[in-house]
Image (cartoon, rainbow, N blue to C red):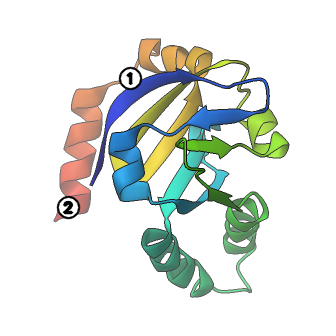
Amino acid sequence: MLIGEFQHALDNKNRIIVPSRIREDLGDVFILTKGLDGCLYGYPMNEWKILEDKLKKLPLTNKDARAFVRFFFSGANEICVDKQGRALLPQNLIEYASIDKEIISIGVSTRVEIWSKEKWNEYNESEIDMDGIAEKMNELLL
């Protein structure tokens, strides 16, 4: 299970060091794509396959479904972690997530999210009604 929060930096070759605790579950090869809220989503290959199968079942005739599938797959890249634990981030994903230098990686159960430190701080400082969200989540879990 992917959990935890890790701070690190992008090097001058657009590589990040994948934290060892995340790398254990993410694997040496994973899928990195555009995420929601302006971050990147990283999926272990087995989780990507599950998501891919679900997305393939969405109706092609539904405009929102087509847009969502396009969004996820157009940004997807297979990422290989080298022997030093580094992963090269594609330029289009760096630009999408507004990554400059400092990065926050968080484990979110089945995926990792990669945020620019600035965006992560903005997200955490925003007025999020976690109690209200928790009540709504209870409805979804039933």
User: Which residue ends up furthest to the front in the rendered image?
Assistant: 83
- Report the quarter where the C terminus lies: bottom left
- Mark 1 element type: loop
Q: Nearer the viewer, residue 17 or 43?
A: 17
Residue at (50, 40) in percent of width and height: 18
Q: Is residue 110 visible?
A: no
Q: Position of residue 138 (x, y in %)?
A: 18, 52
Q: Amino acid at mark 1?
A: Ile
Q: Nearer the viewer, residue 57 or 25?
A: 25
| Residue 66 sits above or below residue 44 on the image | below
Residue at (73, 60) in percent of width and height: 71
For label 1, the crowd category at 10 Å Cα-Cα, with few meaning under 14, some 14 to 19 and many 20 or more, is few
Quadrant of the rendered image containing residue 103: top right
- Report the quarter where the N terminus lies: bottom left
Inter-mark Cα distance, 2 to 1 = 20 Å
Q: Nearer the viewer, residue 142 or 30?
A: 30
**Residue placed under numbered mark 1 in the picture:** 128
Q: Position of residue 89 (x, y in %)?
A: 71, 43
Residue at (72, 67) in percent of width and height: 73
- Residue 102, disc: none
Residue at (43, 54) in percent of width and height: 111
Position of 102 with respect to 1 (left or right) is: right
Position of 113 with respect to 14 (left or right) is: left
- Residue 141, disc: 2
User: Which callout, 2 or 1, points at the residue further toward the start of the chain?
Assistant: 1
Q: Amino acid at mark 2?
A: Leu
